[in-house]
Image: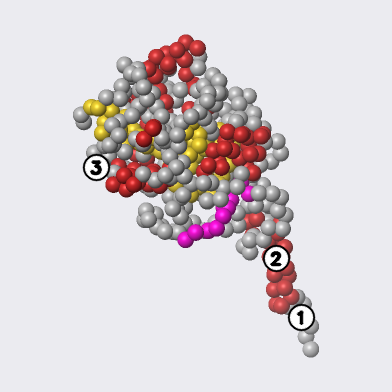
Amino acid sequence: MRRRNGPSTACVALWLFIALFVLQFVNYDWNILNFHLFSDGEPHMEFRGPIKPFTDKYNIGPPPVAKNLPYSTLKPRPWEMKGDTSNDYIHPPRVTEVHLRIMVITYNRAESMLRLLKSLNNVDYLDDRVVLEIWVDRSKDGIIDKKTFATARNFSFEKGFKTVHQQDKHVGIYGQWIDTWQPTADSKEIAVIFEDDITVSPFFYRYLKKVHARYDNRPEINGYSLQGISIKHGGAGGNLHAPNENVVFLYPIVGSWGFSPKKENWIGFQRWFAEARKNTSFQPYVPGILPTGWYKTFLKQGKTDSMWTMWHIFYAYSKKEWTLYPNFPKNAGMTINWKEKGLHFAKTLKNTDPLVMEWDTRLDNLPEEPIHLDANGKIVKH
């Protein structure tokens, strides 16, 4: 009888099975069975709470299926935190195909940010697919505030996905506002940007869905502000408010206490700003409004890097664009600003602004043509 010189087929198959099994634990790229033996903490992209049925109300297709998320691996990923968070940064995988993208921009106010994040957990998102992105800026020396980053990372967002981003260098309020949302031309998501000293109404998303659906086809509307309290930027006294029979109104100046840009207009603004900033002799002055005076003062003080809105105001002025505002009784807003010490306030002020806590049924039948107010709050024909 002839003796076989090599291993049997069964033996080879057994060794291949053992090798593949071991690779499930030691090499992420071969982890086809999604084992995570060496878990070392929370992922930087996570989903909390019950998974609700996906309803394709915007015809954007089914949600992506995330497999083998790198909760842990012996092979480092570029978005994973390594060592001292003051020297490394995270760019987690981008969650795509969502109905709502919430961007919280922050620097070193952990308690303020946590208050905002908790209010986001109380919002009715109508069973839609939501991602919360928290963007943490660095100091001019390149340092991340560890308490703020840890608070963001440890927060449990109960209504959808959460990702935490560290800027790889100091970008300031300009970079945080203008560059965090980079929509593509075919994007159908709603985006909203919040600074960390904001609290939101439980109905803010329901409101945004209504106004986006009603007015996104209007090229002159550049977005939707959520605040209820505002000055009149032309210098007239009193709070900005339209006649009470109007549930919304259009205004020529952006409100930054929660702003949801309209995609096409935002892309246009981003492209214009990128070019306009290259001309160091250009200043975005708009005649007849208070913000121009503020900006000139900041220019003398070397503090124009705290006023990104001046550039948006100029762009809207040059393009004849308008921002839609809510108009609720007592100037209640879908957001309130706590007016805390920081870039915009020299000291913390007492906040008595009202927040919308009940749905206004007039929003279910929005006007085809909202009223227009000028910078002094006067009705203008359009």
Tag 1 residue: 4
Position of residue 77 measured from the top left corner of the image (x, y, whole percent): 63, 46
Q: Position of residue 242 (x, y in %)?
A: 30, 31
| Residue closest to the far left | 381
Earlier in the chain: of badge 2 and badge 3, it is: 2
> Viewer-nearest of labels 2 and 1?
2
Mark 2, Cα crowd under 10 Å, few <14 / some 14-19 / many 20+, is some
Q: Which residue is mark 3?
A: 368
Q: Is residue 288 left or right of residue 100?
A: left
Compared with 180, 99 (above or below) is below
Label whose residue precedes the other's in the sequence (2 or 1): 1
Eye-nearest disc, 1 or 3: 3
Residue visible at 45% across and 34% down in the picture:
354
Instruction: Specify the segment rendered in magenta.
Output: 43-53
Q: Is residue 328 visible?
A: yes
Amino acid type at mark 3: Glu
Residue receiving disc 2: 21
Label 2 and label 3: CA atoms lie apart by 62 Å
The quarter of the displayed image where residue 108 is located: top right
Residue at the location (69% across, 73% down)? Answer: 13
